Amino acid sequence: MAQKEIEIILARHLGSYLSTPIFIVDPDGNLLYFNESAEKILGRRFEETGEMPLAEWGTIFQPMDQDGTPLSSDKLPLVVTLLTQRPAHGSFWIRGLDNVMRYIVVNAYPLIGQAERYLGAVAMFWEKEQP
Amino acid sequence: MNITLWGTRGSLATPGPECVYYGGNTSCVQVTGADGSVLVLDAGTGIRRLGLALPRELERVDILLTHLHMDHLQGLGFFLPLRKPNVRVHIWGPASTTLHLHARLSRYFSPPLFPIFLRDVEAQLTLHEVPRGPIEIGAFQITAALVCHPDPTVGFRIQENDAVVTFLPDHEPALGTRKFPIAPEWTSGYALARDADLLIHDAQYTDAEYVSRVGWGHSAIKDALAFAQLAQVKHLVPFHHDPSHSDQELDELYAQLLEEMQLAFPVTPGKEGAQFEL
């Protein structure tokens, strides 16, 4: 497997020390890493899921709005950031892989390195009281 | 290619009787190709003696700067070819998100830090921000990549025919890891160092020193050895010795660590004047 870009490596290292849940994807949306704090919300350890493509993580957590209507993956803040290379924000329900429903708030931002190298995106998120 | 070490010390030039064997000049390495092409890796204080030793008829020299911290730049103003109008000097350095390489080098080449302006250099000077992807200089194929060190810093992988030398003088791949080494794809510098015939790598601290210097951008010696093992290099030259480490201390440190780790490849602590043929 090819070595990750240094900015991605440093983002993962930072994430591994944060209590804030963090989720890192490459420019194609492939999940590269989520930290231990995110594991509690997503309901599974990263060691168990490993890397996965956008098509998989975009649906596996069954995102839905407050009315229970499924959200298409292009409505997810992280996917909006991937498409626009701009920060995005949103809140929605997910079903963790432990089968527990959680309402989460997500802030996503792009990772743009030197020479405008687009390296992927990061989502920081946390669980919120039911609206 | 021939590789000659002209400066092996880290952070600060350290002359004195306690550093005579490994040397006190800061980072500078010469790489000479079979066709006579000359690369100079970093412009620490070791570059002064290198400049004096180059062939008089040399028409072109390429200086590859890993970054612009003073211990990697301080000798540049004393590099003899910069005073020769008939010499083409190409300087390659990492890009920054704000200032061009010229503007950043000019901070050093201007009063009050230095009496001569960059524009007054007599050689035919060309500055390059190192691009992504390979660079070809003479017979050398060079790859630069950002590595873990504060401020924009690159390492270099230099290939001539089948021979590869990798230069990572300031590098902290263990930063942020709870146990080092970790998986290669998540290790800074791995792609540059993988299977290199010779790896010249930061090895500034003892384990005890590293504890209070995490994030300063340098490696504990043991981590440098572990990184070389991970990258499966054929020969390691630990480099960028801490100014506080005397010859005797370095000898004792390496004797103990090499006995402990029983590595499958040779380790030759960087010493001024040492030469390697690949």
Image: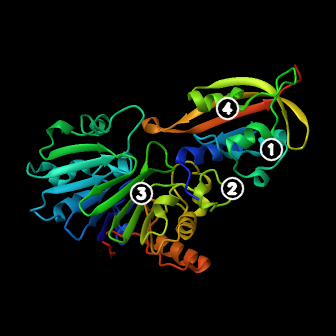
Residue B223 is left or right of residue B34, and the answer is right
Judging by the rendered image, the residue that carries numbered circle 4 is A78
Q: How far apart are marks 4 and 3 (CA)?
A: 42 Å
Judging by the rendered image, the residue that carries numbered circle 3 is B10
Q: Which chain carries label 3?
A: B
Marks 4 and 1 on same chain:
yes
Q: Distance between the residues labelled 2 and 4?
A: 28 Å
Between circles 2 and 4, the one closer to the viewer is 4
Judging by the rendered image, the residue that carries numbered circle 1 is A39
Residue B60 is left or right of residue B158, and the answer is left
Of the residues shown, which amino acid type is indicated by label 4? Leu
Based on the displayed image, in which of its 4 quarters is residue B61 positioned? bottom left
The answer to which of marks 4 and 1 sits earlier in the sequence is 1
Q: Distance between the residues labelled 1 and 3?
A: 41 Å
Of the residues shown, which amino acid type is indicated by label 2? Arg
Asked which secondary structure carries label 2, the reply is: loop
Q: Residue B178 carries which label?
A: 2
Between circles 2 and 1, the one closer to the viewer is 1
Q: Position of residue A50 (x, y in %)?
A: 73, 52
Of the residues shown, which amino acid type is indicated by label 1? Glu
Q: Which chain carries label 1?
A: A
Q: Distance between the residues labelled 3 and 2?
A: 25 Å
Q: Quadrant of the C terminus of chain A?
A: top right
Marks 2 and 4 on same chain:
no
Who's the residue at 52% across and 68% down the image? B228
